[in-house]
Amino acid sequence: MNAPAKPREKTRFDTIGKPRRRVDGRAKAIGQTRFADDLVLPRMLHAKLLRSPHPHAIVESIDVSRAQAQRGVHLVLTGAEFPVPYGIMPVSQDEHPLARERVRYVGDPVAAVIAVDEQMATEALQLIDVKYRKLPTVASPEEGLAKPEPRIHDYGERGNIHRNQSYEFGDVEEALARSDHVFEDLFFYEGNTHLPMEQQASLASVEGDGKLLLQSSTQNPHYLHRQLARVLQVPAAHVRVIATPNGGGFGGKCDPGNHEFVVAKAALMLGRPVKICLTREEVFYQHRGRHPVLMKVRTGVSNDGRLTAMHLQTLLDGGAYGSHGPASTFYTGVLTPVTYELPRFKFEACRVFTNKPACGPKRGHGTPQPRFGQEVQLDKIAERLKLDPAEMRLRMVTQPDSLTASWLHVGSTGLAECIRKVVEMSGWKERRGKLGAGRGLGLACSTYMCGAGVSIYWNKMPHSAVQILLDRSGQVTVYCGATEIGQGSDDVLAGLVAESLGIDPGWVRCVTGDTGITPIDLGSYSSRVTIMMGNAALQAAGRLRDTLAAAAAEALDTLPDRVIFSQDRVFAAQDAGKTMSFIEAIALAEAKFGTLAAVGSYAPPKPPGRYKGAGVGPSPAYSFSACVVETEVDEHTGWVTVPKIWIAHDIGRALNPVLARGQVIGGVYMGLGEALMEEQAFRRLPPKLSSALVHRNPSMLDYKSLTSLDMPEVEVALIEYPDPNCPYGAKEVGQGPLLPVMPALANAIHDAVGVRIDEIPITPDKVLRALEKKEKGEAPRVGPESFPSVPYPAPTFVLPPWEGGDGNELKGQEGRKAA
Amino acid sequence: MSAVPDRVHATLRVNGEDQQVSFAPYKTLLEVLREDLNLTGTKHGCELGECGACAVLVDGEPLLSCLELAVQCEGRDIQTIEGLAKGTELHPLQAAFADHGGSQCGYCTSGMVMTAKALLDKEPAPSRERIREALAGNLCRCTGYQQIWESVESAAKALREGKR
Ligand code: FES
Ligand code: FES
């Protein structure tokens, strides 16, 4: 195992594991935290974007002269100013800050006005004359497969297929053929969006030294930094990105946004600060949210309820641009084998471009959709085989330190404990089936990565780095590129450094998310920050501790490795009377060794899989969750009420239990909203109204989300089996707990009224339709009825570890037969 | 018909202090607070009355500042998040939100705290149900609300015990 370098670990903690006020809590509670739109600079101008009213059109001409002449207008920009495309993934650089010759969805930006205030900029937008030539549109992946022309992009696999892939780990058909049962189910998961409370905002300016500064509500300042340099064609060293604290991200602020390039370019051209804040409606167009995914799941099972093989097919509605799509496509399958022992696995996935806002990463990135399908199908299997769904799962959870058929390494796992815990908390055994008419319990499990094993662009450098400065005033300043999006990354950073140095977190000042000052961290995505930043922080702190110990040992008359750091003091291990304050230790060390600073960095271990494509899915560790949802279904209205949810999350170790619990409940909340109501849905206007594909509900009123009145009580258990790859054993908690909620709800509805809703969201109309079917004696199910023929490629064939494989692709039919 | 003036001059009473301010007459209270008085503690998530992030207290009642014209607030008592702490000492609601996970990203926090304050000013011991109801117009995407309810309960207790 490639274990990361770790400093000597503490086992008794002063700070870790204790509930405490988060380090940024005070500023937030008094309204002093400065979000991007709170920033103001002298001579600041305001930008507004003109967006396409057509879902697919050629931009024949743009005349900006009238807008340009308008009072208060300083600059009008069009695609002509932006020849270089961008995209977060190197293989999908398919966007321009302002469309050049083509628009691809309603809302695609075509021009920008920079004016004295927002009002004037908005008025001037109406004076821009754009001539469009409308093109036929693609509304769904099915349509995209059927209509290869016109192509939305001139790259991709072919026609309107963006990504198309197939992997097979062991001969799946052969295993299905000899299974006692084969279950085949279709599922659909509608798209939904992040809806962060803060609308995206950015402020660009030119600093005194002539360099560009962009302060922006971004989760990924590092990737934005790279893209800005590329698109604006200025050296990266002349660009500085500061990620302002995000008012929620959930993946929606991972992609660089059109607006960020526009204000940056305008500031460089005008030499004045330029700010933009998207309207709520524009946030719905920026999107990058959950992909709508159609799934077909064929699973072989033995009579005693063990899995033999699974063939998973997914079809993703990508929207108009690549975004994180190549990764999203992988994620609709790669984590499927992590929860339960699965001897063979085949996974085919296809992402199709459509004329709608681009889909991308949302909390759980690509994995909630197949998880929903898998866990609902397991419930059906348990029902058919007359097994308890919890018991059945318990018997087949993956083992610690094992490999999956697809060569992912599962390190620590507390999944069995999670299942036992929610069974106990919810009274599953005693209450299930005895709640009375219309009421039910459902269970589901899930897993998530603690950081992607591979960076978004290929490189061999660290994924996270931390620098710590100490000085004789006792000040501990910690620098890291990680971004605070509400998840508590600053608190994790301060807490870990404080614990390692034996001081109160209040001593630590965090400087984060500033590419001009902080060492690189890849960003707040894929639940990577606690693990990667945390390991880097512990390495840096460990180095400083060694230095301090070397200086203090002499004065304490002990050996450096016998020096203990605790409670703002330094002690000799054997004699607590020999002690000095932390500040005295710093002064000694500073005198002896000079100015005190240390860096630490972290890169994930090399994954065991060696086939092409093995880079998506590996992680230093996986978190696990199990969830029980209780429902009450009104059989007359189809209305689903959720009185209570129990969830157990295998977190390794909870660094600050207040925050950990908050992340779990927040994840459950978001999952329940997706399960019951959230949908980013579109409709086609009638031909006389342009046939445009328009967003059904681009407002917070119409895009339904759970309010304080709708949200049930959530009972949380944190399962703590420290993971050796993680800082003090702490695994992720930001995304995992969302995942089991949707299938647990669907399973609970089945338990309550005996109908299957194989589609998310589960709205009352669907429940009613299923109940009507049940009444009529038809199959009591609502969900997709067919799966189109998708031209998946021939699979990359890899033997599972237990079939003699070595992690490489087995080439050719011969090799496969021999296997 | 007389022309609409470019700017109006008004005296707004904000957090107990009279503020002379001149602004375009179409500006909302939200805009004047944030842009003309630099009180950016009040947030916005929609500017359409849908999210509650912009809630402030006007004459003790929670009000969505994005829906109210600033000119209509002359002579009324406006309270924002900035006026809640006593010097550096946090209001019990602020302390509770910071301590009990009531605030994650913090973006909904000002609106939540102000709305909760209006509730506690009237009902010092609200039930969980009452708290949920009172906050139903304030969306939060981070917390799942539970730690917000707990924060309000803890603050109510502190206030009842005379911690302020
Ligand atoms: S900004 Fe006022 S309610 Fe949303
Ligand atoms: S704490 Fe982020 S929206 Fe409420």
Image (spheres, rainbow, N blue to C red):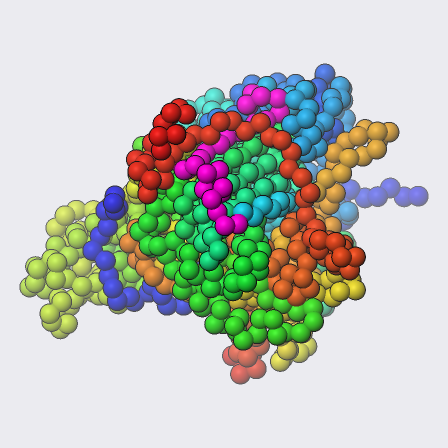
How many numbered tags mark residues here? 0
Quarter of the figure that contains the N terminus of chain B: top right
Where residue A351 sits, quadrant-wise, is top right
Instruction: Report the side of A412 relative to A555 (left or right).
Output: right
- Identify the residue at image location x=11%, y=57%: A560
Where residue A476 sits, quadrant-wise, is bottom left
**In the rendered image, the vertical position of residue A579 relative to residue B105, given as above or below:** below
- Identify the residue at image location x=42%, y=56%: A396
Q: Nearer the viewer, residue A713 or A103?
A: A713
Image spot of residue A423 (x, y percent): 49, 69
- Identify the residue at image location x=36%, y=36%: A799
| Magenta-drawn segment | A155-181
Image spot of residue B106 (x, y percent): 54, 57
Q: Is residue A588 visible?
A: no
Quarter of the figure that contains the C terminus of chain B: bottom right
**In the rendered image, the vertical position of residue A214 relative to residue A641, given as above or below:** above
Image spot of residue A445 (x, y percent): 49, 57
Where residue A559 sits, quadrant-wise, is bottom left
Q: Nearer the viewer, residue A425 or A635?
A: A635
